């Protein structure tokens, strides 16, 4: 190769080097090796007359080589544009190499622990702050009912409620069917198949119906809320609202959370029905129990209390999902990556909180004997 | 002339559906010059630039770049909004093309990135910032450093001074001038900024009705009798800058 770069001592003086060939980024591997080899010895001067191409990378390597020794080596023979480039590079990177601090692994762990506990505290504070802002907006509406955004609420209700019905019904139907099938399969060994009705009825009405629906809503609607609010935050729409003297919580967040609070109990109710239907269907087709018997047994097994226990939880779960979605949406920063992170965080946190809330309710209902 | 033009465009037609944006356009960009392209909004300036860098397909015509070998066909593009990768820091953004196209040792990679940052007038500390933490002017500078990462022989600038205040715009113009002097690249610049045209462009091309209506030094373009060119350079805003008459 004609243009292959080289760095050699051609004259008697070993300190006078000659560079030739193309000193550019295409040959950077070779150049780095040449410079490493030359860097050990003291260099007096580098003759650049035979250099055929020079770019910033080549110029910087030469400059670094020139700075390397105890005294600065002279870079000679560069004409016109190369001279300008070398002159420019000569003034750069004067601050010395970047110090890479080595960190103790234990300290790093402790540091992470500290940071995450502080994050937990600030997350809780943000959640409570949003709860407060939501309540304040709600009170504001009670005082001035005309400021309530009915259209927006109804629109959101359609999106998170009505449009969610088919998928919620399908999922809960399948869950009910699976529980019934598993119950029949295992209870058959004790001859206790008929208790499947009790199991499906109580489990679905008290826990599974509302829990599955809440988790689905968190994944389907909570993430959508976060992404919408986050995108509005990124494009300064939220700031625009504030400057018009409007409260973003009242305009954007209140209708969304209210829609969720209304929709989730309805979805949980429909979901429980679908799950019971799935359970009944399987009991009939797989367990050989006629629908009439299933309904009669169900009537004996479950009471309105079970249904109440389940459905009371729904609006609280909706509130948690909506608040988490709003908090995460508003904490989106400028970048696209941040939007993705907050949306993920919103779904993970709201599902976690929904399950924690369900546990707390279980303890509560057990202690009051429901 | 063919051996001194960095971009050689003949009979270029670009359109979407029924609409023809560039209608048999001819243009030569000379090696080493700064060419400013002006034109009405929606008149096809950006379309021309995006066609040149290969983002839009051409219907017909011919586009040739000087030294059309694989190695030399590296160009830098500065997008209007910077188009920095938001997941990477400023330094990583500059290192990205270097990392992809050449094998540098990590130490050298950092040094080159810092050198580029300094060349565009930023500090090493700015290199650790993410694009969302940068101001408009800094974003443009980092984007310029990224466009220049591989020392391209051809640089495309899309409205480099839009969204900058007059001082920042003037500084950015001066920066392009300085870098142009040391690095000797050819610049194809789409701009609306009359100050930039005056301050840094060697030649100005006016795009109207899908063709180059006038091209040459600013003073000769001003004398063109094309109605759009007249309206553009002799309008009230241009008059204030002392361009008209």
Image (tube, rainbow, N blue to C red):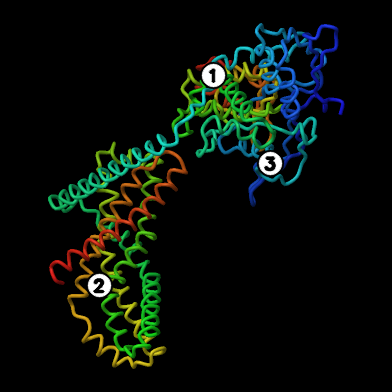
Callout 2: few (<14), some (14-19), or many (20+) C-alpha neighbours within 10 Å? Answer: many
Label for residue B121?
1
Provide the chain ID for the residue under circle 2: A
Residue at 21% across / 86% down in the picture?
Answer: A300
Asked where in the image residue A242 lies, by quadrant, the reply is top left
How far is mark 2 from mark 3, CA to CA?
Answer: 61 Å
Q: Chain of mark 1?
A: B
Q: Between residue A221 and residue B18, name the one nearer to us.
A: A221
Give the foreground label among 3 and 1: 1
Numbered tag placed on residue B54 in the rendering: 3
The x and y percentages for residue B197 are 60, 21
The residue lying toward the viewer, choosing from A237 and A19, is A19
Q: Crowding near pointer 1: few (<14 within 10 Å), some, many (20+)?
A: some
**Which of the two discs, 3 and 1, labels the residue nearer the N terminus?**
3
Locate residue B119: give its quadrant: top right
Q: Is residue B202 above or below residue B131?
A: above
x, y (%) of residue B97? Answer: 64, 34
> Which of A75 and B46 lies nearest the eye of the viewer?
A75
Calculate the distance from the C-alpha at mark 1 to the C-alpha at mark 2. 65 Å
Q: What is the C-alpha distance between the residues marked 3 and 1?
A: 30 Å
Q: Which residue is mark 2?
A: A206
- The answer to whether the residues at label 1 and label 2 have Cβ atoms under 8 Å apart is no
Q: Specify the quadrant that holds the C terminus of chain B.
A: top right
- Looking at the picture, how far across and down is residue B218, in whole percent? 65, 19
Secondary structure beneath label 1: loop
| Tag 3 near tag 1, CB within 8 Å | no
Circle 3 SS class:
loop
Which residue is found at the position 14% from the left and 53% from the top? A142
Res B24 → quadrant: top right
Q: Is residue B122 above or below residue A213?
A: above
At x 37%, y 66%, the residue is A163
């Amino acid at each position: 190769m004609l243009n292959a770069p080289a760095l050699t001592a051609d004259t008697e003086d070993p300190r006078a080097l000659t560079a030739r060939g193309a000193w550019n980024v295409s040959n950077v591997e070779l150049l780095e090796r040449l410079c490493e080899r030359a860097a050990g010895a003291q260099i007096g001067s580098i003759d650049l007359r035979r250099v055929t191409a020079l770019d910033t990378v080549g110029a910087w390597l030469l400059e670094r080589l020139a700075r390397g020794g105890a005294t600065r080596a002279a870079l000679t023979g560069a004409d016109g544009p190369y001279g300008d480039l070398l002159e420019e590079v000569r003034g750069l990177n004067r601050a010395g190499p970047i110090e890479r601090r080595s960190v103790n692994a234990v300290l790093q762990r402790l540091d992470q622990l500290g940071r995450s506990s502080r994050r937990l505290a600030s997350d809780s504070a943000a959640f409570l702050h949003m709860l407060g802002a939501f309540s304040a907006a709600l009170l504001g509406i009670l005082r001035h009912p005309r400021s309530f955004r009915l259209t927006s609420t109804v629109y959101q209700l359609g999106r998170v409620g009505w449009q969610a019905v088919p998928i919620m019904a399908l999922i809960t139907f399948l869950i009910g069917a699976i529980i019934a099938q598993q119950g029949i399969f295992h209870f058959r060994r004790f001859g206790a198949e008929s208790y499947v009705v009790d199991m499906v009825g109580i489990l679905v009405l008290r826990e599974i119906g509302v829990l599955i629906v809440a988790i689905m809503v968190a994944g389907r609607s909570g993430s959508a809320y976060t992404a919408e609010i986050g995108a509005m935050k990124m494009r300064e729409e939220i700031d625009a609202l504030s400057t018009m003297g409007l409260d973003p919580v009242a305009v954007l967040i209140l209708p969304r959370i209210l829609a969720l609070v209304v929709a989730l109990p309805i979805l949980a109710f429909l979901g429980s029905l679908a799950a019971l239907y799935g359970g009944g269907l399987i009991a009939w087709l797989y367990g050989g129990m006629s629908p009439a018997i299933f309904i009669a047994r169900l009537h004996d097994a479950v009471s309105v209390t079970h249904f109440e226990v389940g459905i009371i939880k729904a609006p609280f779960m909706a509130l948690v999902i909506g608040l988490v979605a709003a908090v995460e949406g508003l904490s989106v920063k400028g970048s696209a990556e941040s939007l993705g992170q907050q949306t993920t965080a919103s779904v993970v946190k709201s599902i976690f909180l929904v399950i924690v809330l369900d546990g707390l309710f279980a303890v509560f209902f057990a202690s009051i004997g429901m | 002339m063919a051996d001194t033009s960095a971009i050689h465009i003949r009979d270029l037609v670009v359109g979407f559906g029924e609409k023809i944006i560039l209608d048999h356009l001819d243009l030569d960009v000379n090696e080493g010059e700064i060419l400013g392209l002006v034109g009405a909004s929606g008149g096809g300036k950006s379309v021309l630039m995006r066609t040149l860098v290969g983002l839009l397909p051409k219907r017909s015509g011919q586009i040739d770049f000087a030294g059309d070998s694989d190695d030399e066909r590296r160009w830098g593009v500065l997008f209007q909004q910077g188009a920095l990768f938001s997941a990477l820091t400023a330094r990583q953004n500059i290192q990205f093309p270097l990392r992809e196209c050449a094998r540098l040792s990590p130490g050298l990679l950092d040094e080159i990135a810092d050198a580029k940052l300094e060349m565009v007038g930023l500090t090493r500390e700015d290199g650790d910032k993410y694009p969302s933490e940068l101001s408009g002017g800094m974003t443009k500078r980092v984007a310029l450093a990224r466009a220049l990462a591989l020392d391209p022989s051809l640089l495309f600038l899309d409205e480099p001074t839009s969204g900058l205040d007059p001082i920042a715009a003037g500084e950015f113009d001066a920066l392009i001038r300085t870098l142009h002097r040391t690095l000797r690249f050819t610049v194809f610049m789409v701009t609306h900024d009359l100050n930039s045209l005056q301050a840094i462009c060697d030649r100005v091309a006016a795009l109207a009705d899908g063709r180059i209506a006038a091209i040459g030094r600013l003073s000769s373009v001003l004398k063109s009798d094309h109605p759009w060119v007249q309206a553009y350079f002799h309008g009230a805003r241009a008059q204030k800058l002392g361009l008209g008459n």
